[in-house]
Amino acid sequence: MKNNAVVVGAGIAGLAMARSLAEKGFRVTVLERNHHAVGASVRNFGMVWPVGQPGGELYTAAKRSADIWGDFCREAKIYYDASGSLHVAYQQDEMDVLQELFTHYAGSRDVKLLNAEEVLNCSPAAKPDGLMGGFWSGDELIVDPRQAIATLPSWLEEKYGVKFLWNRAVVDVKKRAVVTGNETIEADLIILCSGVEFETLYPGIFAQSPITKCKLQMLRLESQPGGWRMGPALCGGLSLTHYHSFKVASSLDKLKQRISAQMPAYVKWGIHVMASQNGLNEITIGDSHEYGGTHDPFDQVEINQLIIDYLNGFARFPDMRVRQTWNGVYAKLTNGDPFLFHEAERGVYLFNGLGGAGMTLSFGIAEKLVNGL
């Protein structure tokens, strides 16, 4: 007879856990407090981003996640684009970092160092003026997070028999059981994937954990005319300062020093600028990073304008009109750990704090954690 597992939260972390538990033979029920997922899992680029993960466990998990995403999208017949990523350089210090990254990763990853002409052949979105070169990676893929997160539950139901209970806020956990407003659901295993609402259950544990919240602002451009496609996801030099995998470049400190001196507003708001394209031909751009326990719920025009101004320095699109703006908030660990997995009590685990890498890491990490239980 199958053991019962309850997952709390239907964001990407919860969905990934539901899949892994079902693969392991559990009878899985997912409880979500909203009618559908509305948090950070649908408010992102849709980038599955192994290039940003350092070598070892995290890169392996990111690659595994990319494989699972590909399988899901093909089976569910929804959009994904395995076009890779492209970081472009317009300053010598940016090019120096790209050269070091290629030297370091050439033997272990699908990467290429491109000159300016090769970049333009790879990406019609790259701006030619002042272009020095680029670093291409073939590991990355793009999904539309709104479509993907909305489709995953029905796929999990059909393929694995996972049961979803929507609009069910969990208010308590009592010895192998979760309590909603009017019912108690017993389970052999409970995994809480509550995301940014982590204070709700086991607040004492989270109060003692090195966890905070990050607010980001993003924008979406109009659908590009005539089926125009940008090719790989495109990143400017600011993104080189953001990802852990790029710290292997010794010249990165020099780049950071220039950015701090010349672009203090970008440092203040934690801005690095990237662009990806979804199946509707819309371009998603962003983002900023503000850390703290409570955030202003309103977007700042200044931040969005800084993002657009920097984008105009390295990218060009047929239609640059802004269609939508929004902000998202995710949970992030402050001690540098990539995620939190903690046994709150026997048979009850907390899975949280994936930061901005939820789409990239959740499937791979969840699979490894469940296999280790």
Image (tube, rainbow, N blue to C red):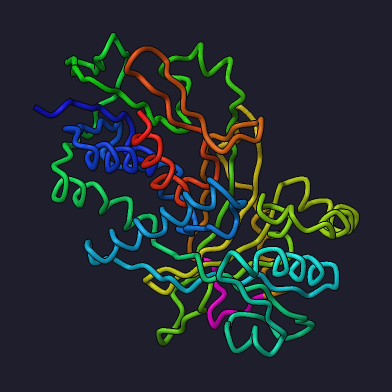
> In the image, 190: left or right of 339?
left
Residue at 75% in and 73% down: 89
Residue at 71% in and 59% down: 240
The magenta segment: 315-322
Residue 16 spot, x, y in % from top left: 34, 43
For the question of whether residue 369 can be seen, the reply is yes
> In the image, 236: left or right of 29?
right
> In the image, 368: left or right of 95?
left
Quadrant of image for the C terminus: top left
Up-down: is 370 above or below 4?
Answer: below
- Helix, strand or loop for the magenta stretch, by majority: loop
- Would residue 92 be counted in the magenta stretch? no
Residue at 68% in and 81% down: 114
Residue 199 spot, x, y in % from top left: 48, 20
For the question of whether residue 233 can be seen, the reply is no
> In the image, 265: left or right of 234?
right
Residue 356 spot, x, y in % from top left: 54, 46
> Looking at the image, which is closer to me, 359 or 107?
107
Residue at 66% in and 30% down: 335
